[in-house]
């Protein structure tokens, strides 16, 4: 098994291209589909959604891509900006393909909002997400553990900032009930999480 570092340096074939900020996965087969990277040199939102197939190698301190910075620039932004226009009612605003509720905060008749460009049916995981058992909050997500042969996530890793001090807690992904975007909910209670056996997690 190997770890997927988040908030770590990302390198293209022709130089640095920012840092990783989130991992996108398919919640059905637990496979990573994309990495989110952020780089102030990128246009628009400075973020890009990078297919996992572009990852050449991973170490604890660096993710190396097999593409150039120019190719990353052409990839979809992860944070996208949409505009809403005032309706006759003054409260509801129509976007191009749906309706939303907002309030204009300037005098132009338009306002803008940002949202994450997560592919349909997939989830975004990022460090610091709260991990909750069915009876309590147990800690925060630190890293993901990946099976390099199958390409799927096997465990969620809590190295610190959890209820058991310096113990490294590795939670099998099969024990995740669901994720709501801010929190990861487990099928286990706090006692069961504490009793999880040690997992051989080797730093790349």
Image (cartoon, grey):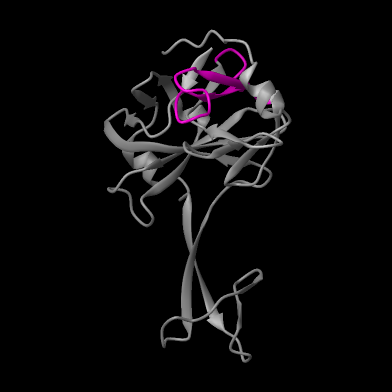
Residue 66 position within the rendered picture, expressed as x and y whole percent measured from the top left: 40, 26
Residue 37 position within the rendered picture, expressed as x and y whole percent measured from the top left: 40, 40
Q: Nearer the viewer, residue 11 or 171?
A: 171
- Based on the picture, tell me whether residue 163 belongs to the magenta stretch: yes
Q: Residue furthest top?
A: 200
Q: Determine whether 149 is above or below 164 in the image.
A: above
- Based on the picture, tell me whether residue 32 belongs to the magenta stretch: no
Apparent side of residue 188 relative to residue 169 in the rendered image (left or right): right
Q: Quadrant of residue 33?
A: top right
Residue 14 position within the rendered picture, expressed as x and y whole percent measured from the top left: 27, 30
Q: Nearer the viewer, residue 164 or 157?
A: 164
Identify the residue shown where x is 47% and y is 36%. Answer: 127
Identify the residue shown where x is 57% and y is 10%. Answer: 199
Q: Residue furthest bottom?
A: 88
Identify the residue shown where x is 53% and y is 28%. Answer: 163
Q: Determine whether 152 is above or below 17 in the image.
A: above
Q: Nearer the viewer, residue 170 or 98?
A: 170
The quadrant of the picture occupied by the N terminus is top right
Start-end of magenta stretch: 148-173
Apparent side of residue 197 relative to residue 12 in the rendered image (left or right): right
In this rendering, the count of numbered labels is 0
Q: Quadrant of residue 24?
A: top right
Residue 84 position within the rendered picture, expressed as x and y whole percent measured from the top left: 53, 76
Identify the residue shown where x is 38% and y is 20%. Answer: 60
Q: Determine whether 71 is above or below 56 in the image.
A: below
The quadrant of the picture occupied by the C terminus is top left
Apparent side of residue 20 relative to residue 123 in the rendered image (left or right): left
Q: Determine whether 74 is above or below 14 in the image.
A: below
């Amino acid at each position: 098994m190997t770890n997927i570092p988040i908030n770590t340096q990302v390198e293209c074939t022709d130089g640095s291209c920012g840092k990783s900020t989130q991992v996108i996965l398919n919640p059905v087969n637990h496979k990573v589909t994309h990495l989110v990277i952020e780089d102030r040199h990128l246009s628009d939102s400075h973020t890009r959604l990078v297919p996992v197939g572009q990852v050449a190698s991973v170490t604890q301190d660096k993710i190396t891509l097999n593409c150039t910075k120019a190719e990353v620039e052409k990839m979809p932004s992860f944070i996208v900006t949409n505009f809403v226009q005032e309706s006759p009612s003054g409260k509801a605003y129509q976007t191009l393909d749906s309706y939303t509720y907002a309030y204009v905060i300037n005098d132009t008749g338009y306002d803008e909002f940002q949202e994450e460009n997560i592919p349909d049916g997939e989830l975004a995981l990022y460090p610091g997400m709260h991990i909750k058992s069915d009876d309590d909050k147990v800690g925060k997500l630190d890293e993901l553990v990946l099976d390099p042969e199958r390409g799927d996530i096997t465990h969620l890793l809590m190295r610190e900032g959890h209820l058991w001090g310096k113990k490294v807690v590795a939670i099998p992904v099969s024990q995740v009930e669901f994720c709501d975007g801010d929190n990861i909910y487990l099928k286990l209670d706090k006692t069961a999480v504490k009793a999880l056996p040690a997992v051989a997690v080797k730093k790349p």
